[in-house]
Image (spheres, helix red, strand yellow):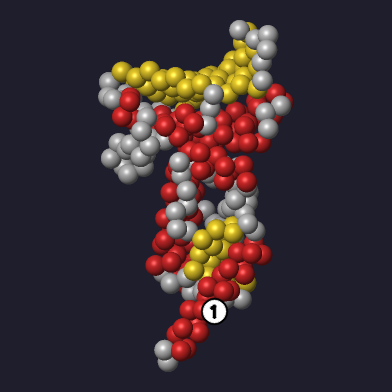
Amino acid sequence: MEQFPVLAVGDFMMISLREDMSDTQVMNLQDELSKQVTLIRPKGVLIDISSLEIVDNFLGRMLSDIAKIVRILGAEVVIVGMQPTVAMTTVELGKTLGSVLTALNVNSGMGMLRMKTMSSTSLAAASGRS
Amino acid sequence: MNTIRDEIMTLQSESDLITVRQAVRTWMVPEGFNILEQTKMVTAVSELARNAIVYGGGGEARLLLLADAARRGIRVTIIDHGVGIEDITKAMVDGYSTGSGLGLGLGGSKRLVDEFNIWSEPGQGTRIEITRWKQ
C-alpha cells in the first residue's frame, strides 16, 4: 500500500499530491485519505495539487469524488494550488471540479477552511449543541 | 513533410501511460512549445492512451516529430485492438460513456489539439491521431 504524507495543522489536515501518479495510486489515495479522516477527525482537509502537471477526466473525477467523500465524513475540503495552465486545459477538456471549493494557494485555502469551520462551530454553539 | 523523429511505445499498463505522457512532454520542450501547449497535448494523450489501455485492451502509441517549410509539430497516434467504437459521431459528444460512467473524453481531447483524426471498426479496434503544431 502506498503511503501518503499527511500533515496535521491544528484542526486541519493537509495532503500534497505527487506528480505523475498512476491510476491505482490515485485510487489508493482516496482509500487512505478516507481512513485518515475517520481516524484523525480533522475539521478541514486541504488537498494540495500544485505538483500536478495535468488533470484529465479520470483525475478530475477522482478529485471531486475524494472531496465529496471527505465532506460526507464530516470535514470541509479545499483543493489548492492548481497550475493556471492545468486549470485552462481542464476547463477546455470539459471537466470542472464541480461544487468543490478551490483556492489559489495553501494560505488562502487555510483561510477558507478557517472561515468555513468557524461558522459551523458558531452555528452549533448558537443552537446549543457546541 | 519530413519526419524528424519516430518512436513506437507500448500501451499495456498504467506505468506505460505515465511513460508516454512524460515522453510527449520531453519531446515538446526543446521544440519551443509553451507550458499551456504542452499541458493540452499531454492531457489529450493521457485521455486517449487511458482509453486504449482500459477499454481497448492495450495497444501502442506512436510519437512523430514532423517538420515542413513553415512549422514543426508533434503527432501522436494511439492504436488499440479492442472492441472499437460503433458510432463515432455519438462517441465524440461530451459525456458519452461506455457504461462505466466515465466519458471517453474524445470531444474534449479534440478541443485540446490542432488536428484530430479517428478511425474505428467494431471488433477491429481504434486508431486516433492527434497533432499539435508550433507555428
In the image: residue B79, left or right of residue A7: left
Residue B6 drawn at (x, y percent): 59, 15
> Disc 1 on helix, strand or loop?
helix
Q: Would residue B1 be found to the left or right of residue B61 on screen? A: right
Residue drawn 30% across the image and 36% down it: B98
Residue B93 position in % (x across, y down): 36, 33
Residue at 53 percent across and 73 percent down: it is A116
Instruction: Say which of A62 and A18 sits in front.
Output: A62
Residue neighbourhood size for the residue with mark 1, other residues' Cα within 10 Å, grouped as few (<14), some (14–19), many (≥20): few
Q: Position of residue A86 (x, y in %)?
A: 58, 43
- Badge 1 is on which residue? A118
Q: Is residue B5 visible?
A: no
Q: Is residue B29 above or below residue A75?
A: above
The residue drawn where x is 58% and y is 23% is B132
The C terminus of chain B lies in quadrant: top right
Question: As rendered, which of B100 and A3 lies closer to the eye?
Answer: B100
Residue B87 can be seen in this image: yes
To which quarter of the image does residue B105 belong? top left
Residue B76, given in percent of the width and then of the height, sits at 53, 22
